[in-house]
């Protein structure tokens, strides 16, 4: 069998999780859930790239880090825009022709009130929870070490301060995210948020 004999199904069978496979899966996705799965895989690669180059990013702002993610997603064939106006300036917006819209709000962690501000922006200013628009992500850039401890504290504070928020997926090491659901104040429908922390501490001993 040579390359001319390989069908799309054959290619995806072997290369579905590769960047090239994701481009195809994004283009042929039939449901919003399929698109979300591809997007989250791509985002995880973007976060890993930021972590791998954290020494070069230690002085970058929230906007500069988020612009890097938007550029990486675009290079992966996913239409992403930074600072698009969605009733305010949303850090990351990903759209597709079938009405899919994913929203990302990014914060460099300085305190938990700052993270709560980001959650409120995402869930009360930008989010609508309408069909294909019920998913978002709080992206936490963290430079102080023990990122998983910070993420646990954020989860605990969030559900204590906001009892309407339900944790739907707990942190499972070494994954650095958890998921929540709450009713969107705008539509009253369920809005789902992935809370992801990106560990960017750079303090080498040598």
Image (spheres, rainbow, N blue to C red):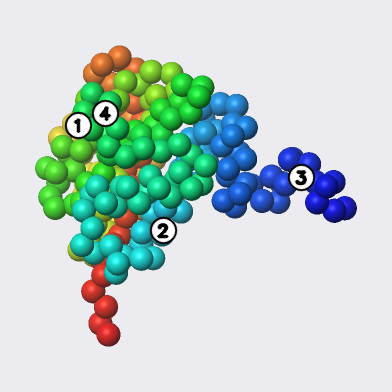
> Is 203 placed left or right of 134 in the picture?
left
Give me the disc on residue 120. 1
Residue 6 locus on image (x, y percent) = 80, 46
* Residue furthest out toward the top: 187
Specify which label sits upstream in the sequence, 2 or 4. 2
Of mark 3 and mark 1, the one earlier in the sequence is 3
Residue visible at 35% across and 21% down in the picture: 129
Relative to 200, residue 177 above or below: above
Q: Report helix, strand or loop for mark 3.
A: helix
CA distance for labels 3 and 4: 40 Å
Q: Nearer the viewer, mark 2 or mark 4?
A: 4
Give me the C-alpha separation between circle 2 and circle 4: 27 Å
Question: Label 1 neighbourhood size at 10 Å, few (<14), some (14-19), many (20+)?
Answer: some
Q: Quadrant of residue 87?
A: top left
The mark that comes first in sequence, 4 or 1, is 4
Tag 4–tag 1 contact (CB < 8 Å):
no
How far apart are the two marked residues, 4 and 1, measured between alpha carbons? 16 Å
User: Closest to the observer: 23 or 165?
Assistant: 23
Q: Are marks 3 and 1 in contact (CB under 8 Å)?
A: no
Which residue does the numbered mark 2 point to in the structure image?
48
Helix, strand or loop at label 1? It is helix
Residue 144 screen position, x and y as percent: 20, 63
The mark nearer the N terminus, 3 or 4, is: 3
Q: Residue at x 55, y 33 (%)?
A: 34
Report the residue marked by disc 4. 85
Dot 2 crowding, Cα within 10 Å, few <14, some 14–19, many 20+: some
Label disc, if present, on residue 10 of the rendered structure:
3
Q: Is residue 117 left or right of residue 198?
A: left
């Amino acid at each position: 069998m040579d390359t001319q004999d390989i069908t799309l199904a054959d290619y995806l069978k072997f290369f579905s999780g590769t960047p090239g496979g994701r481009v195809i899966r994004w283009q042929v996705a039939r449901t919003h859930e399929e698109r979300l799965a591809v997007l989250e895989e791509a985002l995880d690669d973007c976060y890993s790239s930021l972590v791998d180059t954290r020494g070069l990013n230690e002085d970058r702002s929230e906007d500069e880090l988020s612009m890097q993610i938007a550029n990486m997603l675009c290079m992966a064939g996913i239409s992403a825009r930074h600072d698009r106006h969605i009733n305010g300036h949303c850090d990351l917006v990903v759209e597709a022709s079938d009405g899919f819209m994913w929203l990302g709000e990014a914060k460099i962690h300085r305190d938990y009130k700052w993270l709560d501000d980001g959650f409120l922006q995402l869930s009360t200013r930008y989010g609508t929870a309408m069909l294909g628009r019920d998913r978002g992500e709080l992206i936490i850039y963290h430079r102080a070490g023990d990122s998983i401890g910070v993420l646990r504290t954020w989860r605990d504070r969030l559900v204590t301060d906001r009892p309407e928020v339900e944790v739907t997926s707990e942190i499972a090491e070494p994954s650095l995210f958890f998921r929540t659901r709450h009713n969107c104040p705008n539509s009253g429908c369920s809005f789902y948020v992935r809370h992801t922390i990106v560990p960017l501490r750079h303090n080498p001993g040598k």
